[in-house]
Amino acid sequence: MGSLTRKAAIVGVGLSDLGHTPDKTFLQLIAQATQRALDDAGLKKSDIDGLFSAGWITMESIMVAEYLGIQPTYSDNTLPGGSAFEFHVEHAVAAISAGLCETALICYAETPLSDRKRRITRSFTTGNPHETEEQFEIPYGQWVPIPTYALAAQRHMYQYGTTSEQLAEIAVAARKWASLNHLASMRDPLTVKDVLRSPMLSTPLRLLDCCLVSDGGGAVIITSAERAKNLRKRPVWVLGTGEAHTHRSISGMPDLTVSPAKISGARAFSMAGVSPSDIDVLQLYDSFTITVLLQLEDLGFCAKGEGGPFVESGRLAPGGATPANTGGGGLSCLHTGMFGIFLLIEGASQLWSECGNRQVANTKLVLCNGVGGNLASSGTVILGVE
């Protein structure tokens, strides 16, 4: 397999307004994040010749290009769920390496919180539910996504003895990071007991085991190695990437305790030439607490079945041995529906030492891992600075 190591680098990132943005459409949020990312990189919109976008509207990437006034030479709207943007990093670096574009924009925004207040709903089902895999799940109350992830959590508990208290440790760690982030939606103190006292939504997942619902968007600028060396900020190099998907429906998942991060992570580590022990900071998709625990195991930070003990005693929290989701993650900062782009933005910001009170000292290597669908897809990106 060919290597994309140091063929391209992240040179700018931007966030839109976050939280509740009833005065802005998703396109306005994308435009806002894009302009902030361009300003961050010291580039102009005319420099963008590659566009990577993911959304739920038919031909959304073409709509985004029209709204931004961009006519890219290379375009990609791959949509494997929340891991889309890690997939896009790999695709952008490959396109840049092949000379199909030089400077790529990865962008995304959604407004699910405002939509909910407007009584606008969105279905995760694609196509006629009587013709797709949902026909085998919906009759049994398996609406997505909470019960699907609860199945994985329940199986992990049965098979390995994982406890609700251990899952709660993941939510508590995320809240401690969020308390240091002025952009986070949930900053009040949180304890394991608080998590365990929150309402049960789908056994064994409680309300505080689940991500937030937020409006927001983000943008990431990636450019060629040659150009990256002459821009405003030091390059955040893409060192390794991997992508994988193993199923679509939760009933088709080969093993409820093993996510496709096992495959994507192995590919990324191999390409980057590093191991889990070399990583300074983790940015892991945290749609639910169980999502984080499975990734820790599947990416090799602990053995399969040992995720519960691994996260105890604040290991993922500020001051812990394995700092993870340093912005507060989807559990306490924000979650717009597909969180993967925010992992990249926080990861690059840590490498640029721009995170203020939540900055992890001497960060040189960051791993970002997105998860999509019903634990269906995984995209792994390893980033580093000189």
Image (spheres, rainbow, N blue to C red):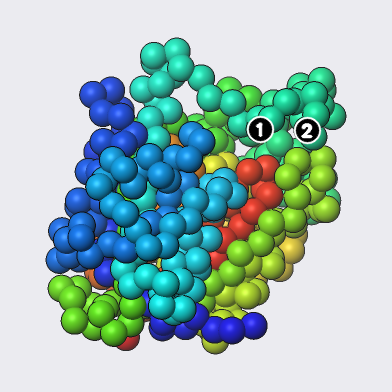
User: For residue 311, what is the image quadrant?
Assistant: bottom right
Residue at 33%, 82% (x, y): give it: 225
Mark 2 crowdedness (10 Å alpha carbons): few <14, some 14-19, many ≥20? few
How far across and how far down the image is residue 334, in percent? 39, 39
Residue lying farthest top? Answer: 119
User: From where the camera sits, is residue 346 visible?
Assistant: no
Residue that label 1 marks: 126
Examine the rendered structure and indicate whether residue 311 appears above or below residue 228.
Answer: above
User: For residue 270, what is the image quadrant?
Assistant: bottom right
If the image is split into quadrants, where does the C terminus sit? Answer: bottom left
Identity of the amino acid at label 1?
A: Thr
Secondary structure, mark 2, is: loop
The one nearer the camera, 302 or 268, is 268
Q: Is residue 220 left or right of residue 45?
A: right
How far across and how far down the image is residue 155, in percent? 80, 44
Residue that label 2 marks: 132
Identity of the amino acid at label 2?
A: Thr
Mark 2–mark 1 distance (CA, rounded to whole Å): 8 Å
